[in-house]
Image (cartoon, grey):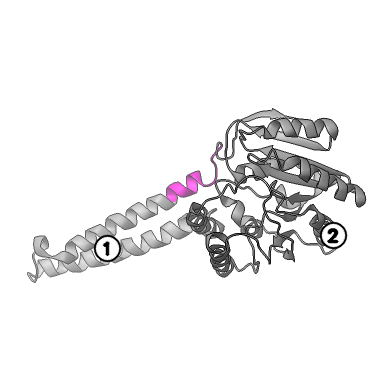
Amino acid sequence: MKDISIIVPSYNEAESLPHLAEWVDRVMNEHRFSYEVIVVDDGSTDGTWQVVEQLHQQNPAWTGIKFRRNYGKSAALNTGFAAADGDVVVTMDADLQDSPDEVPELYKMIKEDRYDLVSGWKKKRYDSKIAKNIPSKFFNWTTRRMSGIQLHDFNCGLKAYRHDVVKSIEVYGEMHRYIPVIAKWAGFGKIGEKVVQHRKREYGVTKFGMNRFINGYLDLMSIMFMSKFGKQPMHFFGAIGSAAFLFGFIALAVVIIMRLSGQIALTTSVWFYLSMLSLIVGLMLFLAGFLGELICRNSSTRNQYLIEKKL
């Protein structure tokens, strides 16, 4: 097993990768780490894969996985996690905004301080304040409140993990923003943070738009639901459904008694229709919980991606 596996999701980063490779190799050699770098080409169209092939020829420590089309960062990370063989796994972006000089300290925090996961915190950022900084702060505040994890920057691409963590978690959709939450849910509770350097982008353009904030909150709702009820959806749907069904049953009984006593007519009573609606909704929610129990997290295709080539 190697000391470090570095996973680099890449989408149209042909210009940045040679500079990143030079930087990573220098840091790894200076600290005498045994290492591998796994570049996951997420369907690039600019020659990124040709650069990966060149890097592999120059240094076999650089390996690659090429997707046939663009699946997104979560897919790239999940595939990289499956391939990683390092005792410590580090993720970083390919755009040179993450500094490889941070890796030795991240490695130390995992190995010596016994953290399960260490997340970078880009305390000083060079992004647009309106487009990125302010929305990111609000997003991180909300995630801290809902998850109970006291991190300042959940979405920082520079993170370090114990080997067991990446082999125990599953990242799909756009859940890469919430890997610390997923790790905590999986039972890895010792999560740390390190202030890291944030650099200006030197090549290309950002691949993320404003829609990531909308999708981010939807994903957060999904994760919080799955963390509490993912294994037992009946506890959520069944509880609400049972309460609605009980309310409807009692309301219907009262309406029938009032009808028999001649106080109301069923066709003109709003309570009759509310009670029937409550009964139907309660039954549907109960059935949803039951079906959820049957199919819960058993999809065999959720994390299948078409891989065109491997080195």
Q: Which corner quadrant of the image does residue 73 belong to?
A: top right
Residue 217 visible in rendering: yes
> Which residues fall within the magenta stretch?
290-300
Q: Residue 80 in the image: state x and y as whole percent.
A: 70, 42
Identify which residue, 276 or 88, lies in the foreground: 88
Q: Residue 153 in the image: state x and y as whole percent.
A: 64, 63
Of the numbered discs 2 and 1, the one sitting upstream in the chain is 2
Q: Residue 306 in the image: state x and y as whole percent.
A: 60, 31
Q: Amino acid at mark 1?
A: Phe
The residue sitting at 60% across, 69% down in the picture is 148
Q: Which corner quadrant of the image does residue 64 belong to?
A: top right
Disc 2: which residue = 108
The residue sitting at 72% across, 43% down in the picture is 16
| In the image: residue 179, left or right of residue 288 | right
Provide the secondary structure element on which disc 1 rests.
helix
Q: Is residue 47 magenta?
A: no
Q: Amino acid at mark 2?
A: Lys
Disc 1: which residue = 249
Q: Residue 278 in the image: state x and y as whole percent.
A: 28, 60
Residue reaching furthest to the front: 202
